[in-house]
Amino acid sequence: MSKINKEMAEQEFNRWCEAMDIETDVEFFQEDEEYQFTKNKRKVVKSIMLGSSVINDKGLLIFTTTRKDTNKDYTFEEHDGGLLVSIENIDGGNARMFTGCGEITSTSEHDFRSMKGSDLKTSQAIWLLLMA
């Protein structure tokens, strides 16, 4: 994992947001939305700085878990309406997130249910930004 400075990490974050059509202009946010966006952005930018998240040439975010026992890459693809249909009847935000993350990374919801610490928090931040 290569480390980059904060300015470069923020440029990469913005490139990802543009590719995924994630609104970044806080002028259009309500107060609570701005707080959540800033919090999640900070987590993802830090992950990019540390090298555990990279943005590929297609603008997709690839997150590599940091725990040695579960080290694995997850490519967060752009979601479609099928994802929204598959999670609409799931009770609970975390269950919805785990299922959704498994689906948009073409892996398993179990992978996300079993994440711990920083890996779980980073995945959650990515999910919340994609779903905003």
Image (cartoon, rainbow, N blue to C red):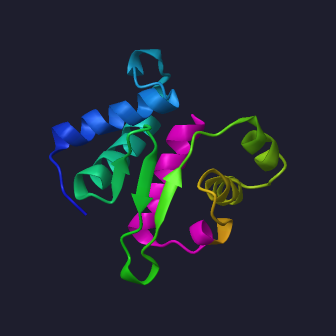
Q: Does 30 sit above or below residue 40?
A: above
Q: Please give the name of the residue rendered at 34% of the width and 38% of the height, measured from the top-left corner.
A: 13
User: Residue lying farthest left?
Assistant: 5
Image quarter of the C terminus: top right
Judged by its main secondary structure, the magenta piece is helix
Residue 25, image x and y in percent?
39, 20
Q: Does 112 sit above or below residue 80?
A: below
Is residue 40 visible to us here? yes
Q: Nearer the viewer, residue 29 or 112?
A: 112
Q: Nearer the viewer, residue 121 or 47?
A: 47
Residue 48 highlighted magenta (yes or no): no
Q: Please give the name of the residue rendered at 56% of the width and 45% of the height, measured from the top-left corner.
A: 77
In the figure, is residue 131 to the left or right of 99?
left
Q: Does 87 sit above or below residue 2?
A: above
User: Residue lying farthest right?
Assistant: 89
Image quarter of the N terminus: bottom left
In the figure, is residue 62 to the left or right of 127?
left
Q: Please give the name of the residue rendered at 47% of the width and 16% of the height, measured from the top-left corner.
A: 28
User: Residue lying farthest bottom?
Assistant: 69
Residue 89, image x and y in percent?
85, 49
Residue 85, image x and y in percent?
81, 42
Q: How many tags in the picture?
A: 0
Residue 124 highlighted magenta (yes or no): yes
User: Residue lying farthest front?
Assistant: 57
Which segment is the magenta one?
A: 111-132
Residue 30, image x and y in percent?
50, 22
Q: Please give the name of the residue rendered at 43% of the width and 37% of the height, measured from the top-left corner.
A: 59
Is residue 120 visible to us here? no
Q: Quadrant of residue 92?
A: bottom right
